[in-house]
Image: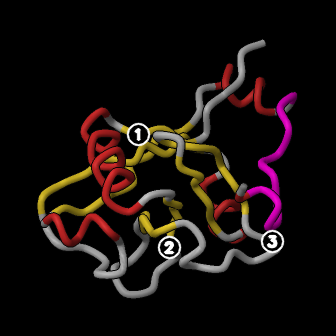
Amino acid sequence: MATVVRVTATPEALAVIERLQAEHGALMFYQSSGCCDGSSPMCLVEGEMRLSPTDVRLGEIGGVGFHMSPSQFAYWQHAQLTVDVVKGHGDSFSLESSLGLCFVTRSRLFTDEETAALAHQAVPQFGLHAST
């Protein structure tokens, strides 16, 4: 049975991630849960934000860990998230804002087949050890 990917990124977002990595080094993503710019993915220098021991690591995009709170995961667990990038200024804490860009999260519900596969797949890792 194939592994279901919980988070992915568009080619445009991956190009911006690569550019930000070249400029800032190791990065991390955190899906915010309503502060400042609503619910958006924040791209930060790795370690710039302390993760909670209960935060969920959904996976990686462009080699960068993607995290969210347990309450956000409870909401998004039935959907695949796709990080995209658009022109504009979103969360001023996110690194891409200095480029006049804004990462956004798009989603789609998992298919019945993907949902069945997820039943046999490990729950995303929890805790600080998952961010390495």
The residue furthest top is 1
Q: Is residue 128 magenta?
A: yes
Magenta stretch in the rendered image: 120-130
Residue linked to disc 2: 32
Q: Is mark 2 on a helix, strand or loop?
A: loop
Quadrant in which the N terminus is drawn: top right
- Residue positioned 53% across, 61% down in the render: 28
Between the C-alphas of marks 3 and 2, the distance is 15 Å
> Does 35 lie within the magenta span?
no
Q: In which quarter of the image is the C terminus?
A: bottom right
| Mark 2 or mark 1: whose residue is earlier in sequence | 1
| Vertical position of residue 54 compared to residue 36: above or below | above
For mark 3, what is the residue? 54
Q: Which amino acid does label 3 sit on?
A: Thr
Q: Is residue 105 left or right of residue 28?
A: left
The residue that mark 1 highlights is: 9
Report the magenta stretch's main SS.
Answer: loop
User: In which quarter of the view is residue 48 placed?
Assistant: bottom right
Q: In which quarter of the image is residue 127?
A: bottom right
Foreground of the two, 17 or 90: 17
